[in-house]
Image (tube, grey):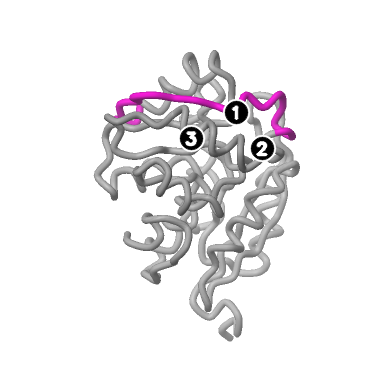
């Protein structure tokens, strides 16, 4: 029997336990006929995810059509490879498509035709330069500029104010960039994307918005979602 509220799709969302941003941001983007069913998992140093398969098994009991990982892992050495491996494992065990914040963002950049990008993160200059930038460039993009909020801990990322977010986007913005990529699923950006695009005159790919965009589009749902930037409205 079809789910009366999730009659188009049910998305199962796996979120790091301390992350208070992914769930409300994806809720902002929900379209009629799609529901988001969330579960939380442990995240350990090095962005390890012990026990996530057991959490997934419980989430599967509500019969989701796809799994969404509320993770970007560019801040850890080898993080993108680890994320790809995790997504592959979960896909094999669940039999479902699995989307992640990192790889959805790169799919979005390719969809809009961006090759030279500015990057916004919640990290400090050293981590941005030595860990994040090389991993982004490993996906075939040229990082023109990069700036971060330098949050002192993972838990502190969500505390960034509107002014801090606007400031870091202004710092990252570069005339040669085709778009601005925002990484860090705990950095609350989705509701600001429209105003940030106006301020920077650039398309903004926010990782949580990209995650939902990819899940919708690859599920055959083409609804234009207004008010959260060009990606969701036009692609």
Q: Nearer the viewer, residue 198 or 215?
A: 198
What kind of element bears circle 3? helix
Say which label, 2 or 1, has the lower sequence index: 1
Which numbered marker is on residue 136? none
Question: Residue 70's spot in the image, x, y percent?
Answer: 59, 46
What kind of element bears circle 1? loop
Number of residues whose C-alpha sits closer than 10 Å to that of mark 2, classed few (under 14), some (14–19) or many (20 or more): some
Which numbered marker is on residue 160? 2
Q: Which residue is mark 1?
A: 149
Q: Which residue is mark 3?
A: 169
Find the magenta span and give its range. 138-156
Residue pictured at 69% horizontal, 40% vertical: 158
- Mark 2–mark 1 Cα distance, whole angstroms, equals 8 Å
Number of residues whose C-alpha sits closer than 10 Å to that of mark 1, classed few (under 14), some (14–19) or many (20 or more): some
Of the 4 image quadrants, the one containing the C terminus is bottom left
135 relative to 41, above or below: above
Cβ atoms at labels 2 and 1 below 8 Å apart: yes
Q: Main secondary structure of the magenta part?
A: loop
């Amino acid at each position: 029997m079809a789910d009366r509220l999730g009659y188009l799709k049910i998305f199962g969302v796996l979120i790091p336990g301390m992350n208070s941003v992914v769930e409300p941001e994806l809720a902002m983007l929900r379209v009629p006929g799609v529901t988001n069913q969330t579960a939380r998992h442990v995240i350990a140093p090095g962005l390890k995810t012990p026990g996530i398969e057991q959490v997934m098994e419980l989430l599967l009991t509500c019969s989701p059509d796809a799994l969404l990982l509320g993770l970007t892992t560019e801040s850890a050495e080898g993080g993108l490879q680890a994320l790809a491996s995790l997504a592959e494992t979960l896909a094999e065990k669940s039999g479902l498509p699995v989307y992640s914040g990192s790889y959805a963002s790169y799919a979005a950049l390719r969809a809009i035709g961006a090759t030279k990008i500015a990057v916004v993160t919640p990290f400090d200059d050293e981590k941005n330069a030595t860990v994040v930038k090389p991993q982004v460039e490993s996906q075939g993009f040229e990082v023109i500029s990069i700036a971060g909020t330098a949050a002192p801990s993972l838990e502190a990322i969500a505390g960034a104010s509107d002014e801090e977010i606007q400031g870091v986007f202004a710092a990252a913005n570069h005339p040669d960039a085709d778009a601005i990529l925002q990484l860090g699923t705990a950095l609350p950006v989705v509701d600001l994307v429209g105003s940030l695009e106006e301020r920077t005159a650039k398309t903004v790919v926010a990782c949580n918005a990209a995650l939902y965009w990819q899940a919708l589009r690859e599920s055959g749902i083409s609804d234009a979602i207004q008010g959260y930037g060009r990606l969701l409205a036009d692609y």
